[in-house]
């Protein structure tokens, strides 16, 4: 039975070998679901994969804890290794053209994980690189995070189709990837945010066009309506990296969007709490909710490792 399940997952993921993962929309509904199943198999120990000393290059121009460590550990567990290509200690930080960097690193590394500001930069890396490029976070999307988020939801509530995830806060990169990935998995995604902080309309339209199994993708300005009956309630910091100067303005705009016990009372009785971290207790989430019985925040952080292990195994042809 286990061998059959592994073979089924492998068949669904074969086409991902050598592919880039720049957006949650880059993989099909079937491929996305199969990645979550592979991540689950790797986490349980049901499946072991050895990539035979492949090398992942990390190009991070934004600060990172979970993404950097989880990618490094994921590669180690797959029998590979990582090279940290921090722009401050390489020629990347001295203005070497991206097209040169991408082509040279493709000769040394088997895949690149890039964390940067502009989505166009990662698109350019993918254009010039001859190895798979993975979006480890841009201002537009955070697709690896979304895989871990829905893996966590799946572990607690089972089959994802028809479930509802409510995201409360800024319509940012995390919200964008949740909408796209959720749509593919048949999850109803509600974004609850103040007016003026909505997700990009183009991403909303794209998510709706991708929606499977009747999933609805909604943007609401009332946090209570967004949370009502949801199986998972998710939040993120109000000011992302690069928006620190807007902190005070955002605190005022988001005052009614703090994930507290009262707001959680409108969700399903068995709802889980998610946060991609780092968290600011007392701002977007109370300490009581973060540390409460419904919180799966640290399971979610762990699942970055398992989701990225599955992703790396798939794009590097380790199945």
Image (cartoon, rainbow, N blue to C red):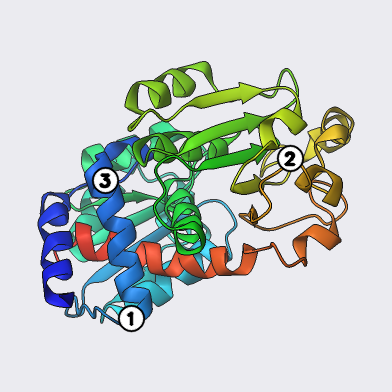
Q: Considering only order in the chain, which callout, 3 or 1, is on the residue closer to the N terminus?
A: 1
Task: State the image coordinates of residue 50 (x, y, percent, origin top left).
Answer: 19, 80
Give the residue drawn at x 34%, y 66%. 39
Mark 3 residue crowding within 10 angstroms, few (<14) / some (14–19) / many (20+):
some
The reply to whether discs 1 and 2 touch (Cβ–Cβ < 8 Å) is no
* Residue 38 image-quadrant placement: bottom left
Work out how far the residue at label 3 is from the one at label 2, CA to CA, in angstroms.
34 Å
Q: CA distance from mark 1 to mark 3?
A: 30 Å
Crowdedness near tag 1: few (<14), some (14–19) or many (≥20) residues, C-alpha within 10 Å = some
Q: Where is mark 2, residue-wise?
A: 239
148 vs 75, left or right, is: right
Which residue is nearer to you in this view: 239 or 87?
A: 239
Which of discs 3 and 2 lies nearer the camera? The answer is: 2
Task: Describe residue 153's horizontal placement relative to residue 287 as left or right.
Answer: left
Residue 266, labelled with which disc? none
The count of marks equals: 3
Q: Which callout, 3 or 2, points at the residue further toward the start of the chain?
A: 3
Q: Is residue 105 above or below residue 21?
A: below
Residue of label 3: 100
Secondary structure category for the residue under label 1? helix
Residue 13 lies, in percent from the top left, at: 16, 55
Q: Label 1: which residue? A: 77
Q: Closest to the observer: 43 or 113? A: 43
Q: Nearer the viewer, residue 169 or 215?
A: 215
């Amino acid at each position: 039975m286990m061998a059959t399940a592994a073979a089924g997952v492998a068949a669904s993921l074969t086409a991902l070998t050598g592919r880039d993962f720049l957006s949650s929309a880059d993989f099909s509904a079937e491929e996305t679901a199969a990645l979550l199943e592979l991540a689950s198999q790797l986490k349980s120990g049901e499946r072991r994969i050895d990539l035979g000393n492949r090398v992942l290059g990390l190009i991070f121009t934004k600060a990172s804890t979970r993404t950097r460590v989880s990618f490094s550990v994921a590669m180690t567990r797959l029998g590979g290794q990582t090279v940290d290509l921090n722009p401050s200690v390489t020629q990347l930080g001295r203005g070497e053209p991206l097209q040169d960097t991408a082509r040279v690193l493709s000769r040394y590394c088997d895949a690149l994980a890039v964390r940067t500001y502009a989505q166009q930069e990662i698109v350019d890396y993918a254009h010039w690189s001859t190895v798979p490029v993975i979006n480890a976070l841009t201002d537009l999307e955070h697709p690896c995070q979304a895989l871990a988020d829905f893996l966590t939801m799946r572990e607690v509530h089972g089959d994802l189709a028809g479930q509802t995830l409510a995201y409360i806060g800024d319509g940012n990169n995390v919200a964008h990837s949740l909408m796209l990935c959720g749509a593919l998995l048949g999850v109803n995604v509600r974004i609850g945010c103040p007016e003026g902080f909505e997700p990009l309309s183009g991403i909303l339209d794209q998510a709706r066009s991708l929606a499977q199994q009747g999933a609805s993708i909604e943007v609401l300005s009332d946090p209570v309506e967004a949370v009502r009956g949801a199986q998972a309630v998710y939040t993120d910091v109000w000011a992302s990296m690069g928006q620190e100067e807007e902190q005070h303005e955002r605190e005022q705009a988001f005052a009614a969007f703090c994930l507290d016990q009262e707001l959680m009372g409108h969700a399903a009785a068995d709802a889980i709490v998610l946060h991609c971290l780092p968290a600011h207790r007392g701002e977007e989430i109370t300490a009581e909710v973060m540390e409460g019985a419904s919180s799966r925040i640290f399971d979610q952080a762990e699942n970055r490792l398992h989701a990225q292990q599955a992703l790396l195994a798939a794009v590097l042809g380790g199945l």
